[in-house]
Image (spheres, rainbow, N blue to C red):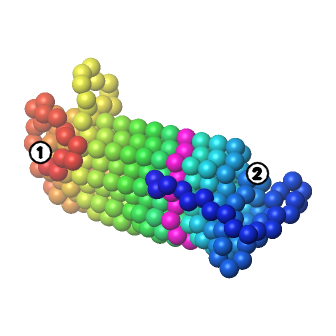
Amino acid sequence: MRRFLLTTAAATAVMLGGCIEVRAGGGGGYFASGDSVLSTDGDASLVGADITASGRAGGEVSVVSADFRANDLQAGSLSVAAADVRFTGAVDRDVEIAGADVRWEGPVGGDVEIAAADLVFDGSVGGRFSAQSADAELSGRFTEIDISAADVEITRNAEISGSLEAAAADFIHDGRVGGDLTLSARTAKLNGDVDGEVRLSVDPGRRPWNAEDGLVEINGRIGGGRICARTVVITGQVTGPLALTADAEPEIQGGSAADIQFTARNGERCERGWEG
């Protein structure tokens, strides 16, 4: 994440019920801490242990804090370094966040880049969404996603118009991907749809295995592609050719897959970035 720019400029601060209301004109910036109501066409820089912000800043809002709360905040762009982040509002351009626990609700017009331990994101993203996290749950509308996490859940309320690239231990997809899905994982459950092709590397890891190590479940609809895994179960629909490398031929349990080209894995690793 880029270094945050903390600017100060001439401003007027008035105490209003325990909050600081700061106004700046002419595109200038200002510095505030605590509870802040923003009203500026320029930038805003906020530093403090606990910060709550609302209002509007047409430029960049930069935050360095332990806990940051944004209540219906409207910003041109946003960059945050905080342990605990709770955001509701809207950002016109890009968002960058580094935090431990991040909860987001609202639209973003540009790109999003997040590094967090726990991430829950519900909104819309006009640009590219990139995240690194331990646990991630994504809902809303996205153009394209690139995510790395231990556990990734794409909820049933998620729609990705473009591609989805993910690296995870456990991956659950309940939404819809309009483009291709590229995944490296230990377990993958595709309950939703993928209009494009899939490229799945789902390696079981070292023995002893549990029942889900190296397991791919296709319970929705995919457009074909390439899969390397230990076990593949199809209860959904595969509409295009599927090149499958696994320990055994797929278990088709009420689903359909007309064109499967099977190759025995023979104990070989499903390497990350495998493309069949």
Residue 105 can be seen in this image: no
Pointer 2 local density, CA inside 10 Å: few below 14, some 14–19, many at least 20: some
Q: Quadrant of residue 165?
A: bottom left
**Residue at left offset 82%, top offset 64%:** 13
Relative vertical location of residue 47 with respect to residue 44 in this rendering, above or below? above
Q: Quadrant of residue 100?
A: top right
**Residue at left offset 39%, top offset 58%:** 145
Please identify, in this view, whether the residue under mark 2 or under mark 1 is nearer the observer: 2
Relative vertical location of residue 10 with respect to residue 186 in this rendering, above or below? below
Residue 253: image x %, image y %?
29, 42
Residue 43 can be seen in this image: yes
Residue 23: image x %, image y %?
76, 70
Of residue 212 and residue 43, the one placed in the foreground of this image is 43
**Residue at left offset 49%, top offset 55%:** 3
The local secondary structure at tag 1 comes to strand
Q: Quadrant of residue 272?
A: top left
Residue 227: image x %, image y %?
21, 47
**Which residue, given by chain and number where applicable, does mark 2 sit on?**
34
Query: In 3D space, how far apart are the residues under numbered discs 2 and 1 (Cα atoms)?
Result: 61 Å
Determine if the magenta segment contains residue 98.
yes
Relative vertical location of residue 16 with respect to residue 234 in this rendering, above or below? below
Of residue 8 and residue 55, the one placed in the foreground of this image is 8
Left-right relation of 168 to 74: left
**Which residue, given by chain and number where applicable, does mark 1 sit on?**
262
Q: Which numbered circle lies on residue 49?
A: none
Left-right relation of 136 to 107: left
Relative vertical location of residue 216 with respect to residue 192 in this rendering, above or below? above
Left-right relation of 79 to 207: right
Start-end of magenta stretch: 88-100
* Amino acid tagged 2: Gly
